[in-house]
Every structure is written in structure tokens, then in C-alpha cells.
Amino acid sequence: MSNLLIQNGRIVDPASGLDSHQSLLIREGRIAATGESADAALDAETQVLNAKNLVISPGLIDIHVHFREPGQSAKETIGTGSKAAAQGGFTTVVCMPNTTPAIDNPGTVALIQDKVEKDALIHVHTTGAITRDIAGESLAPIGSLHEAGVVAITDDGRCVQNHDLMRRACEYAKMFELPLMDHCQDESVVGKGVMHEGHWSRVLGLPAWPSLGEELIVSRNIQLAQLTGSHIHCQHMSSAGAVQLIREAKDKGIPISGEACPHHFTLTDAAIAGSESFWEESGADWLNMIHIDHERPQWPAYDTLFKMNPPLRSAADRAAVLEGVADGTLEVLASDHAPHCSYEKEVEFDMAPFGITGLETELALGLTRLYHTGRMTLMELIRRWTTHPARLMHLKGGSLSVGEPADLTLFDPEEEWIYDRMDTPSKAHNSPFHGWPMKGRNRYTILDGKVVYQAH
Ligand SMILES: [Zn+2]
Ligand SMILES: [Zn+2]
């Protein structure tokens, strides 16, 4: 394997605090040197990559994706999902276990690992279910799942409603030091809700999914984390109340963490009433800072591409999620990439499945909403995709130290482009951001020293 010397880029490495224009040398798949000693190693065997205008970041990590294998490979596979992730700038992802059948036993974990070995372009890890068949009735064999190599447990898509069962899951997870993640949804409160409870659910006459449904379970999780000492990671936080609960619990030293998805800090429930309502309520100041020639994106009311779980919430909730990410309350960014076939989404709003794709737009939306608006430094933002998720999930990566595997993301934080939802290796195109102007784009994804994606 030849050496690769990356020149003229800006290294931003949250693990070491380095933010500087320096060269970086990769040798035999690992980071071999930075700075002058990297340049000094240039010889006939070394390939040079010119990273002018690019940020060199540790390979980005997304700990919340749905790659649909086994059982739903018409929507996505580990092969296609991992290619979409590489396009988005991700070198490591963590898959959710709500497949068909659910990933709730060591045999299915082995099947996934086999597929990953054969088909994955990047590092793909899997979680296991908390309960058998994600039915919330009895615990999955957590010890055997751990032994089989799951990196965390979660019933994502569902939420364990029985508090005693969840308490026992915490105790098991603690025993194995296995991270526990939760999709926070109180089913008795949410019922058949499909959109945020508020002004727009009343105007549109759609069944409501109140913030209370999220906040009750976040409170429950805080109490269980305190009681058992088991760390609980609250997935896709969407409500202002939930963000505040996590903030206060962390202040008290309770082992809890939270995650934010780009759609929750970009969109609001007004989007379900159509683009005019959304833009009227939102303003578009942050779109105005993108100078590339673009139309203001438009869509009709009841567009199912704006249906996800938890739902898009109010402008105040969106502001609270942004604030939560910026102040570190929500320490992880993730896509909740949830592919569906087009025909499944082309039905009435009530009937459509929840979820949107997101790996292709995650980096750009994060940069646009959190960095270009001045809320966060590049270093802090990159932490949310590198050191923080690596620490929480006990994953390798997230660092550019000499000797580490050369997993890197090289992106242009200033590049302006228009997102086309058909421009993806994913099998699915259910993104609400089609035609949106974006600022910031992945140019190269490097895995173990090899370029696995290069923007065209
Ligand atoms: Zn979920
Ligand atoms: Zn999910």
C-alpha cells in the first residue's frame, strides 16, 4: 500500500485540540506523522492529495442509522447504506435493531457481521434489542448480545413502556458496561399521534404526538440512570422540555446523554402545513447567507417527507434543540437515517411510515445551522460527530493522533451546493431537503488510509 500525504488542509482534531494548517501523512493505513515531518517523508512512493480549502477531520461517526437488514432490503442494505454514509462523510455508523426479524439474538448479530464483512464500505456496528422482538415484554439475552459484539442496546422505533423491565435492562447493561440507548416515547400519551401537538395539529386535524410523551420517558430515564448508575443515552431529542431535563440531570452528575438530529434543529411542524406556512413562521435568514443561485424550496401541505418520529416540533423547540447542542447538553449529532420505498411514503399522512433519510445532508445542515450561524466553533461541532459518540459508544476512532487508523473526513465548510435527493447510492430518496441550498460539503472520505468516497 502506497503512502498518502495530505497537504494544504486545515487539521481540526478535537481529541488533541489541534486546529492548524499542516500536512498529514498516512502510511500502511495509519496516521504516521503531521506537520513538517509529514512533508519530509515525501518520496516517489507517496501519493499527494491537495486539501486546499478543506478541513481534515477525524472520520465522522453517526450512532443512529437504519440499514434495514435483515428483512427490509428493498428499503436499504448494509452495502447501499454504507455507501450513502461514505458520501456524507461518515467512516463509522451504528445500526438500529428494529429489522425483520429484530436483532435480538446472537445469530442475527452474526448475520449482520457477515454482511458487514462482505458489503460494507465503512465501519458498520450494530446494536441489539433491549427486549425480545422489540415487543417490550421480556428482556432479550443481553449478555449473549454483548458477547456477540453489539455496541449498545436499544428498542429504537419502540420504547420500553414497563419501567421495571427497563430498570432490569439498566442493571444488565451496567454489568456488561454496555451502552443503553432509548427512543423516548410514552405510548399511553402518544397513542396514534403523527405530528406535534400544537397550533398546526389543530389546524391540520391530524392526531397529535405531544412533547409530554417524550418528556415523561426522559424523566423516567433520568431516575433510572440515577438509581442504577447505568448510563442512558436519549435518542433524537425534539422537545424543549426534554432538553432542559437532560441539562439539569447532567448538572447533578447523573449519567445521561442526549442526541440531536438535523431535521429537528432545521424544520418545524409548520412544514406539514406546506412551505408557505413554514417560511412565514421560520424566516429564512440562514438561507439568505447562502449565495448560490437558488429558489426558496417549496412543497405542499401534508407532505409525508415531513413525517418522522419524534415529530417536527414548534419553533421554540427547534431553538431549544439548537441551544442544547451548542451548550453541550446534547453531545451527539446523528441522522436517524430511516430509508423507505417511495410507494410507502406516497399515501395519506396518517398512513405513511415515520422516518426520513439523512446521511447525505447531515454534515451540511450541521455546518449551516450550528457553525455558519456562529453558534459553535468548527472544533466544537466536530466533537459532536467524533470524540463524543466514540466515548459514549466505546468505539475506536474520533482522533487524528499518530498511530491511529487513518479514518478521515475532508470537507469544504464553505462550498455551496443544492441537494438533489436522487444523488445518492442509497436505495431510498425520502428526504425533505430536496432542492435545498446547503453550505459545507464532504469532498473525501478516507477509511484505513484508502479513499472510499470522492465528490465529483
Ligand atoms: Zn427512534
Ligand atoms: Zn431511529
Image (cartoon, rainbow, N blue to C red):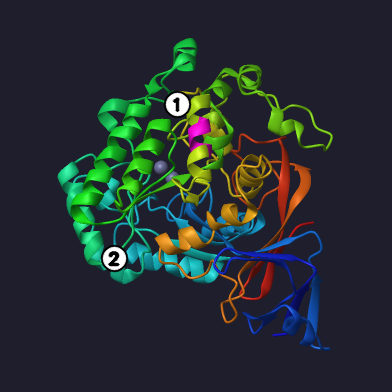
Left-right relation of 433 to 76: right
Left-right relation of 383 to 140: right
Instruction: For residue 135, say whether it is visible.
Output: no
Check disc 1 and report the residue beneath it: 351
Left-right relation of 440 to 131: right
Quadrant containing the C terminus is bottom right
Check disc 2 and report the residue beneath it: 177
Q: Secondary structure at mark 2?
A: loop
Tell whether label 1 touches label 2 (CB within 8 Å): no
What residue do we see at 31% from left, 45% from top?
249
* Nearer to the camera, 245 or 5: 245
Q: Amino acid at mark 2?
A: Glu
Ligand 2 visible in quadrant: top left
* Nearer to the camera, 126 or 283: 283
Crowdedness near tag 1: few (<14), some (14–19) or many (≥20) residues, C-alpha within 10 Å = few
User: Considering only order in the chain, which callout, 1 or 2, is on the residue closer to the N terminus?
Assistant: 2
* Nearer to the camera, 385 or 190: 385
The span shown in magenta is 318-322
What residue do we see at 76% from left, 66% from top?
9
Instruction: For residue 195, say whether it is visible.
Output: yes
Please state the horizontal and vertical placement of residue 8, each as a whole percent of the image: 80, 68
58 vs 182: above or below:
below
Residue 29, by quadrant, is bottom right
Residue at the front extreme, as displayed = 251
Residue 303, by quadrant, is top right
